[in-house]
Amino acid sequence: MPQRALLYRRPSEPQAIEIIFDRSIYPVRLRRHRQARRYTLRIQAATREVILTIPPRGTLKEAREFAQKHGGWIAARLERLPEAVPFAHGIEVPLRGVPHRIVHRRGARGTVWTETDAAGERLLCVAGDAPHIDRRIGDFLRREAKRDLEIASLRFAADLGVTIKRVAVRDQASRWGSCSTAAVLSFSWRLILAPSLVLNYLAAHEVAHLAEMNHSARFWRLVRRLCPGHERAKVWLDVHGSDLHRYGLPDGGRGPDYTEGI
């Protein structure tokens, strides 16, 4: 066996360990990574999972000691995470920044639609059986996000004279949007929960990358030209962005990560 392969071989290791802090037990998933240079801890906000990355030459004993040393950090970060908000009857969720209360209309025709009741309350109505509410609301929000992002992106692309190959939406792990060299724009569907100014800013940001694949002064001039209120949108994301990840179930992806390491 090549010497390089031997370097990364380890006897059977547990997939997770437990640490105790202030009389509470916290499970910690272990992950050994070839390119890691140090022990690091992170918490996936969407799943509330604590992950400890171990460098190639690290030991289980050192990993356990590292996690235990940072038990206070783990407890504090988990405490600060907002509680998950499922897509269920009676729950209030934002749609384009406007609160809507989910109302289950089991016997109604259709899937998901919006309406306003006699008192002026915005409703997000969903038909069908109760077990399908979460999926139907999630699918509806993804469709709305894709539609709004496509409209905004194509409008901005026409303004700059650039071409978009495709617009995709998914549950992005750590970025709200991205632009590939193949002119494919990808966005987090959760932008549909934010005010429209925020969604438009992200669309303008990624379209501007089709002309300037960097964050130079010229790039930001293009963003400012496409979306004059982009500073306010950036501030909104900094303050409220992480809160968007608590709505619905994770889409197989991750929420924003909180990282501690030595």
Image (cartoon, rainbow, N blue to C red):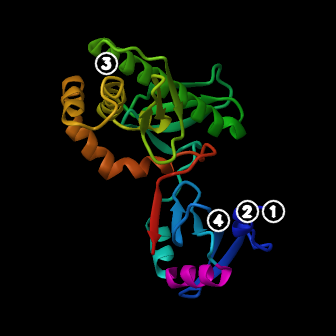
In the image, farthest residue toward the bottom: 23
Q: Give the mark, 4 or 2, whose residue is nearer the N terminus.
A: 2
Q: Give the mark, 2 or 3, whose residue is nearer the N terminus.
A: 2
CA–CA distance between discs 2 and 3? 49 Å
Tell me, yes or no, whether the two marked residues, 1 and 2, touch with CB atoms within 8 Å.
yes
Q: Residue at x 44, y 20 (%)?
A: 150
Residue located beneath label 4 in the image: 31
Residue 115 part of the magenta segment: no
Q: Position of residue 247 (x, y in %)?
A: 51, 46
Residue located beneath label 3 in the image: 156
Task: Please name the amino acid that badge 1 sits on.
Answer: Met
Q: Give the mark, 1 or 4, whose residue is nearer the N terminus.
A: 1
Residue located beneath label 1 in the image: 1
Tell me, yes or no, whether the two marked residues, 1 and 4, touch with CB atoms within 8 Å.
no
Q: From what the image shows, is residue 193 above or below residue 79?
A: above
Q: Position of residue 111 (x, y in %)?
A: 62, 24
Span colored in magenta: 59-71
For the residue pair 121 and 84, the one nearer the viewer reads as 84
Kindly tell me whether residue 83 is visible in this rendering. yes
Q: Give the mark, 1 or 3, whose residue is nearer the N terminus.
A: 1
For the residue pair 39 and 78, the one nearer the viewer reads as 39
Residue located beneath label 2 in the image: 5
Q: Please name which of the two marks, 3 or 4, marks the residue nearer to the observer.
A: 4
CA–CA distance between discs 4 and 2? 17 Å
Q: Residue at x 69, y 63 (%)?
A: 4
Q: Residue at x 65, y 68 (%)?
A: 29
Task: Please name the amino acid that badge 4 sits on.
Answer: Arg
